[in-house]
Image (spheres, helix red, strand yellow):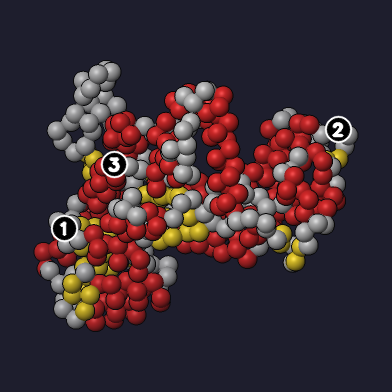
Amino acid sequence: MNSSNDRRRNGSTVLIVDDEDDIRELLELTFLRMGLGVRTAGSLKEARALLAEHSFQLCLTDMRLPDGDGIELVREIAASHSDLPVAMITAYGSMETAVLALKAGAFDYLSKPVSLDQLRALVKSVFALPAQSAEARSGASSLTGDSAAMQQVRGMIERLARSQAPVYITGESGSGKELAARLIHEMGPRAGKPFVAVNCGAIPENLMESEFFGYRKGAFTGAEQDRDGFFQAANGGTLFLDEVGDLPLPMQVKLLRAIQEKRVRRVGDTVEQAVDLRLISATHRNLKELVDQGRFRQDLFYRLNVIELRMPSLRERREDIPALVESLLDKLAGEGGETARPKLSARAHEALLAYAFPGNVRELENILERAMALYLGEVIEADDLHLEPGEAERAEGDVPLTGGVALERESLQDYLDRVERQAILDALEKTEGNRTAASRLLGVTFRSLRYRMERLGMKDSGI
């Protein structure tokens, strides 16, 4: 059953594991035309023997084999040959199998009948990995901090960059979810292709389909020319869906189909377009709770949450604050064209170490930017930081610190809800209860404002 062919230009060899002669032959001919060496196996036993004797740069395995299933092989390769990318060949429409393979450590998957275009795209991605990873390995250093939490995040990002599996990034607002997504893209084989970031909560519901999938000229009033959507713009690269939990249910159905089929149809078009992209999603909300509440589709959640990356809050890595302060002050001074940047007094450092940071690193940057604009003299003092009074008291010693961690007087969610509720009330007061005007004032969509008010129990507030 085994076959081999050493006619290759770059010394790379592919292992094909499939018990169907015609599939093996088709794949072998395709790889040979691409200048790759090929060895084939028709069973798990034969594949294991080849893996023990030879070095491979890519493995393709079918799910169903005479003496087991491909998932077993994926797990074995992930455990014993961690540098070998492996892709699963699945039956048409078998998304559960594809997700299981990705969770087990597969690089990507292909559906039968195998599309040669998708196969070539997969191969090009795999063989771009070594050069890209070597050049971009230091990219994760832009996630400042040497805490155990950040070391774990950087290591996870390096591993995720080698895969094409969908990644689901969780974490509080301002914790660096988009930065992590960009690093996964930049350290992977798609680095030279587009990275398209989309804030799902900022798109009006009636425009979502055309924004995501594009439209044909004349599809609706105002469609004066053909236009690509986010999926087409990200073709070959990475599509990052931020705040994916804000997607309405009808759009969730369309998104699920596009992910499963790897094809999209523009509004007003009669044909579909194939798209090849890496999908990364993020949210600060608990999608599992939304699934339980019937507000997020379970099948879409299962498809997005293949590999989860959790970004820690700044409160969880307070030991990184001094390094972050130095890095951010350098950045802000450079952006402002200043020849020298200020330093923080010891008291200012203490105040920052004691602060709760509900807005995480983004809030720290805003605090420092404001302080640099307003401070007098050569040193930024604690008063120049203008921290929330309730939080600043901690720097005065009113609330003891243990191990550098401040004891909080209310939960983070309660604090954020209180701040958000007050901001909405202030906006509604300024606009005399006009929610449309208030949403513009707050910089959010009307739909987003309506949802936030419902979540905060303000729907029947009488405003």
Q: Which mark is residue 376?
A: 2
Callout 1: SS: loop
Residue 197 image position (x, y, % from top left): 44, 40
Going from N to C along the chain, the mark reached first, 3 or 2, is 3
Instruction: Please give the name of the residue rendered at 12% of the width and 69% of the height, measured from the top-left corner.
Output: 20
Callout 3: SS: helix
Instruction: Please give the name of the residue rendered at 61% of the width and 46% of the height, measured from the top-left corner.
Output: 359
In 3D space, how far apart are the residues under numbered discs 1 and 2 (Cα atoms)? Answer: 67 Å
Asked whether 373 or 383 is in front, the reply is 383
Residue 255 image position (x, y, % from top left): 28, 45
In 3D space, how far apart are the residues under numbered discs 3 and 1 (Cα atoms)? Answer: 23 Å
**Whether residue 336 is situated above or below residue 79 in the rendered picture:** above
Q: Is residue 371 left or right of residue 463?
A: right
Q: Is residue 104 left or right of residue 359?
A: left
Q: Which residue is mark 3?
A: 251
The answer to which image quadrant residue 265 occupies is top left
Q: Classify 10 Å Cα crowding around label 2: few (below 14), some (14-19), many (20 and above).
A: few
Instruction: Please give the name of the residue rendered at 75% of the width and 66% of the height, measured from the top-left corner.
Output: 402
Identify the amino acid type marked 2: Leu
Q: Quadrant of the N terminus?
A: bottom left
Q: Are marks 3 and 1 in contact (CB under 8 Å)?
A: no
Asked whether 457 or 448 is in front, the reply is 457
Q: Which mark is residue 92?
A: 1
* Residue 279 appears in the picture as rendered: yes
Identify the amino acid type marked 1: Tyr
Q: Classify 10 Å Cα crowding around label 3: few (below 14), some (14-19), many (20 and above).
A: some
The answer to which image quadrant residue 85 occupies is bottom left
Asked whether 272 or 186 is in front, the reply is 272
In 3D space, how far apart are the residues under numbered discs 3 and 2 (Cα atoms)? Answer: 51 Å
